[in-house]
Image (cartoon, helix red, strand yellow):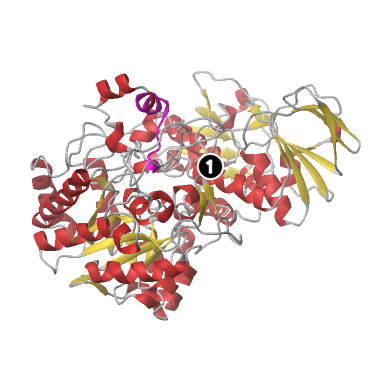
């Protein structure tokens, strides 16, 4: 272990509970010990997930949020003692690891509930909503401090929560916390005056217009959260730890409007001056630790920072708020061990909060401790499996149902929260397998096959492993993607997998191996557009082809927007042309990612032409047509086209030949890696 990391392995206390080191696994939706988006129960899959991380040197584990009242069915969490008996037995095993667990409880989502089209229908039609109440009580699920617009869909305002509902929820927190204590859980965390969830909607001025004792002054707006901790302390005793998930600053300009890094704006949520007072009040009320970051669902990229956000993005605000309280403060948000260790050693924070890195590599702390940093598989902040709630144009959340029910899976590590479906099973019939293509799909296939006992051989036509992901990782903000390529190459070498570089396979029938996996990727679409030959293909730009000052980007999907953002960071002047009614109009691209790109491009004053069709690429720009039918020219030095891709396998599927990655179906890193497992597990 590096000497600078030693402070991360020192003990600290939350109240009277000692935590063995400074690593905190913060909560992630989907890892709740009581299940997720389904009737509450003791969740075996989450229990396995949490225990594995505890065994690998994490000091404090916070399972995913547990709604105090079921989203589906409306049962209170304290009802049904069987799950708490199972929890008690589990805690005995858990504590043998030396880790501590605090269960995170939430009052709900309020206007931040990621409602889909079905939920929108129930909210807009009174009769259907009434009939569905026993299953989905949308009035309660989306209840908030005031009648405020839903983050995800128009025409679906939240209904103000009644005093009777508030009192019932406070009682439910106390009763549930007592059951957790009796089961041996080390503490509870209240979620939260954080991220624009229900308690935060009460706490902030722009979402709370109440005229009663829960609205108006800061004291009134914090009353709900304060009543909860007082009720828990009364029920469980003053020494039972109660921590709070807390957003220091909201970073919010208005409904559905966040503030990107470096932007000057007027805060409508909680600004630092108010946060200083709030933190002190919350401590005095009885909270024993603040688990901090920034943001709301209107500025979601602060609480769930995508690849574009800087590392340690919340540290400045969190270490500032540490000056105003005497209780421990944890900071989360793309934290790096180097920076966290320095901040802890200087007393600016008390512990390092980490979430998604635990999804991709359960052993990362152990590897850090043992000085094996090159073996740590990095999280690339893609949100391709852990958070796929998407919004574009006038859509509600268009997330697939299976993704909504099974969150906190991982694009890079299929076993995460899917241990029954994806696991390494040793083969009893070893086979030799030729893998054509050394990109991510090919390398992942080879690793799984090797671990199962097969003999994979990679044939790669270029001089290095990585495939098109090398270009995808070339953006200045994708350092973790480049680390992932290095990790793959390291794993291939460690496992002793045979690799033939500069070897192009055109005829699979000539291969001597028993089975063949084709992972040759995709080719760019080339629609019939006049002058298309004058344009630069996106991948050519990413390989380093130079472009001029004024660049027109055709295609406002994820790649096109990332290219435009990169060009703006280089000081160039991009313009985006997109046929659809919004940027990044892609299902499965997390709102944290897409909203950052939309708002960062607007902040950087990048012109965007939506619902605009490309007609011709000219020598000095493009000819386009807008939705009204008007044609006009956009002048520029260069044109970059990002018009999608189509599979390009060197051989079709057969009994011997299997396709993975984009050679099978164009998708993202998740589809590439999960498909590689699907194929490699069956050979």
Binning the other alpha carbons within 10 Å of mark 1 as few (below 14), some (14 to 19) or many (20 upward) gives many
Direction bottom: furthest residue? 346
Is 117 part of what is drawn in magenta?
yes
Measured along the vertical axis of the image, is residue 667 above or below residue 188? above
Residue 371: give x, y in percent of width and height: 42, 68
Residue 642: give x, y in percent of width and height: 70, 35
Q: Nearer the viewer, residue 148 or 251?
A: 148
The N terminus lies in quadrant? bottom left
Dominant secondary structure, magenta: helix
Direction front: furthest residue? 211
Measured along the vertical axis of the image, is residue 236 above or below residue 33? below
Q: Nearer the viewer, residue 391 or 401?
A: 391
Is 152 part of what is drawn in magenta?
no
Range shown magenta = 111-123
Tell me, yes or no, if residue 445 can be seen here.
yes
Describe the element under mark 1 as helix, strand or loop.
Answer: helix
Which residue has dot 1 on it?
443
User: In the rendered image, which quarter is residue 345 located in?
Assistant: bottom left
The C terminus lies in quadrant? top left
User: In the rendered image, which quarter is residue 430 located in?
Assistant: top left
């Amino acid at each position: 272990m590096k000497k600078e990391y030693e402070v991360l392995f020192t003990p600290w206390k939350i109240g009277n509970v000692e935590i063995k080191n400074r690593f905190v696994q913060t909560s992630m939706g989907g890892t709740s010990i009581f299940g997720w988006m389904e009737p509450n129960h003791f969740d075996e899959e989450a229990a396995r997930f949490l225990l594995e991380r505890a065994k690998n040197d994490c000091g404090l584990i916070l399972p995913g949020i547990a709604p105090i009242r079921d989203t589906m069915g409306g049962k209170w969490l304290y009802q049904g003692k069987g799950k708490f008996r199972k929890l008690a037995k589990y805690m005995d095993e858990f504590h043998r690891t030396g880790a501590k667990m605090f269960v995170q409880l939430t009052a709900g989502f309020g206007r931040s509930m990621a409602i889909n089209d079905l939920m929108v229908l129930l909210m807009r039609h009174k009769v259907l909503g009434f009939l569905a109440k026993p299953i989905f009580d949308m009035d309660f699920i989306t209840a908030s401090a005031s009648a405020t617009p839903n983050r995800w869909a128009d025409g679906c305002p939240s209904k103000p929560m009644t005093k009777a509902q508030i009192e019932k929820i406070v009682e439910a927190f106390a009763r549930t916390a007592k059951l957790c204590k009796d089961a041996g859980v080390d503490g509870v965390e209240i979620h939260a005056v954080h991220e624009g969830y229900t308690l935060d909607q009460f706490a902030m001025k722009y979402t709370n217009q109440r005229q009663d004792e829960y609205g108006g002054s800061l004291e009134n707006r914090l009353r709900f959260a304060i009543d909860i901790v007082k009720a828990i302390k009364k029920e469980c005793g003053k020494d039972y730890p109660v921590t709070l998930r807390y957003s220091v600053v909201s970073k919010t300009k208005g409904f559905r409007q966040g503030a990107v890094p470096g932007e000057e704006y007027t805060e409508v949520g909680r600004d630092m001056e108010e946060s200083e007072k709030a933190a002190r009040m919350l401590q005095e009320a009885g909270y024993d630790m603040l688990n901090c970051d920034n943001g709301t669902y209107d500025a979601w990229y602060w609480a769930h920072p995508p690849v574009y956000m800087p590392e340690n993005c919340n540290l400045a605000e969190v270490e500032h708020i540490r000056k105003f309280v005497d209780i421990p403060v944890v900071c989360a948000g793309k934290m790096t061990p180097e920076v966290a260790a320095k901040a802890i050693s200087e007393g600016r924070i008390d512990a390092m909060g980490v979430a998604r890195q635990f999804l991709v590599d359960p052993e990362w702390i152990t590897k850090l401790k043992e000085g094996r940093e090159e073996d740590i598989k990095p999280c690339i902040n893609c949100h391709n499996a852990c958070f796929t709630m998407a919004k574009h144009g006038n859509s509600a959340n268009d997330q697939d149902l299976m993704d909504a029910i099974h969150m906190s899976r991982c694009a890079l590590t299929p076993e995460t929260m899917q241990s029954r479906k994806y696991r390494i099973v040793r083969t009893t019939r070893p086979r030799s397998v030729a893998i054509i293509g050394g990109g991510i799909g090919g390398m992942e296939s080879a690793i799984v096959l090797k671990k199962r006992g097969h003999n994979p051989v990679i044939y790669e036509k270029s001089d290095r492993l990585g495939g098109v992901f090398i270009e995808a990782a070339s953006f200045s903000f994708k350092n973790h993607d480049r680390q992932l390529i290095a990790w793959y190459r390291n794993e291939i070498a460690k496992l002793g997998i045979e690799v033939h570089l500069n070897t192009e396979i055109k005829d699979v029938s000539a291969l001597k191996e028993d089975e063949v996996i084709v992972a040759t990727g995709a080719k760019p679409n080339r629609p019939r557009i006049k002058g298309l030959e004058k344009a630069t293909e996106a991948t050519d730009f990413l390989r380093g082809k130079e472009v001029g000052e004024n660049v027109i980007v055709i295609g406002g999907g994820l790649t096109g927007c990332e290219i435009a953002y990169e060009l703006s960071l280089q000081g160039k002047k991009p313009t985006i042309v997109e046929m659809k009614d919004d940027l990044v109009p892609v299902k499965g691209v997390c709102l944290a990612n897409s909203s950052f790109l939309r708002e960062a491009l607007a902040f950087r004053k990048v012109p965007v032409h939506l619902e605009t069709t490309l007609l011709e690429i000219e020598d000095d720009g493009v000819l386009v047509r807008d939705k009204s039918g008007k044609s006009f020219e956009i002048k520029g030095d260069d044109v970059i086209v990002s018009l999608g891709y189509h599979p390009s396998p060197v051989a079709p599927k057969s009994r011997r030949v299997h396709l993975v990655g984009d050679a099978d179906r164009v998708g993202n890193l998740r589809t590439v890696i999960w498909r590689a497992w699907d194929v490699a597990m069956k050979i």
